[in-house]
Image (tube, rainbow, N blue to C red):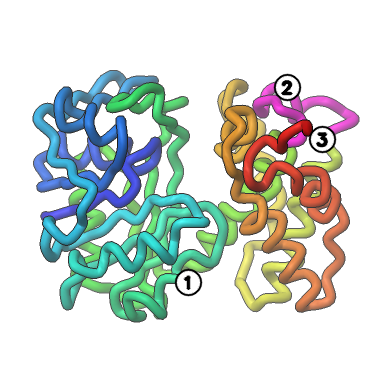
Amino acid sequence: MRIAIVGAGGIGGGYGAALAAAGADVTFIARGAHLAAIRSKGLKVEGGRGETHIMPAQATDDPATVGPVDVVLFCVKLWDVESAGAQVKPMVGKDTAVITLQNGIDAHERLIPILGRQAVMPGVANISATIAAPGVIRQTGIVMRMVFGELDGTTSARGQALAAQCAKAGIDGVFSAAILTELWMKFILLASNAGMMALARLPIGHLRDDPDIAPYFIAAYEEVVAVGRASGIALPVDAVERTLNFNRNAPAHLMASMGADLLRGNRIELPWLSGKVIDLGRRHGVPTPTHAFMYAMLKPFVMGTPSQG
């Protein structure tokens, strides 16, 4: 199977290295110092699952040189969806599946006008990893799960083939018939946890058991569930409890990527997380006061740490 990883950061690098180690023909689309390091020293992934070192690794900053592939794991940040989508067009053939593995819930909707509905397959990434140094990915914990599915809920040969390739790579690959529900179940957790951890500048272990903080997690989750149901998404009756259970079992040092980006002074994905909750809440008449507060307090940091001048 030919696979292109667009955005070879923590998520893309983690999945891509596992797939390459299992024999898939993987090309990493990267840039800058990270690309240079991958080309010269290969790609290394370290962490709870042990060490994987892909050497040599196929890497480029020009998708046009790769040619059509079977699968594109589309792992860019939310603000790069449209520009990166236009760049991957040369890699998309008649049966190519472009798996959107962004945070948020609308990356697939934004890609369809660019690549066509047939090419786009929504996905959910369950992996916590970051670039530790150029050419080096560090994973937190051992979870490496990927859920993906056709928008119409049908079974397809390409979805089954990717699930089989994931199994070879030690990835818990799930080809789902209800991918929008899966996408929203992650969004309940991520949109809320990202805001909470970014506001506190602390990982989950410092927050989840604090009696003054815990109720705000629940309130934030309940707002996303209400907005999802108002949007026509079939969410389980115990959606909030499932989300709380994830929090209870997460590694104490787990930090939402938006929190990590904020601490580095980088741009953050707030408009597509709490911002999206607020937007849909207004559209459907659902109050979202917890997310509105988080959005307002984090808004000055959307483009990175503001200058003090």
User: Principal SS element in the magenta part?
Assistant: loop
Which residue appears at 83% of the width and 55% of the height? Answer: 292
Viewport quadrant of the N terminus: bottom left
Residue 209, above or below 289: above
Magenta-drawn segment: 199-214
Q: CA distance from mark 1 to mark 2?
A: 35 Å
Residue at image position (52%, 60%) is: 183
Residue 246 appears at what percent x and percent y? Answer: 61, 39
Residue 144 picture quarter = top left
Q: Position of residue 119 (x, y in %)?
A: 29, 74
Hey, which quadrant is residue 35 in on the image?
top left
Number of the label disc, if any, that sits on residue 110: 1
SS assignment at label 3: helix
Near-viewer residue (119 or 166): 119
Q: Which residue is mark 3?
A: 214
**Marks 3 and 2 close (CB-CB < 8 Å):** no
Q: Find the distance from the CA under tag 3 to the CA under tag 2.
A: 11 Å
Q: Could you tell which of marks 1 and 2 lies nearer the N-terminus?
A: 1
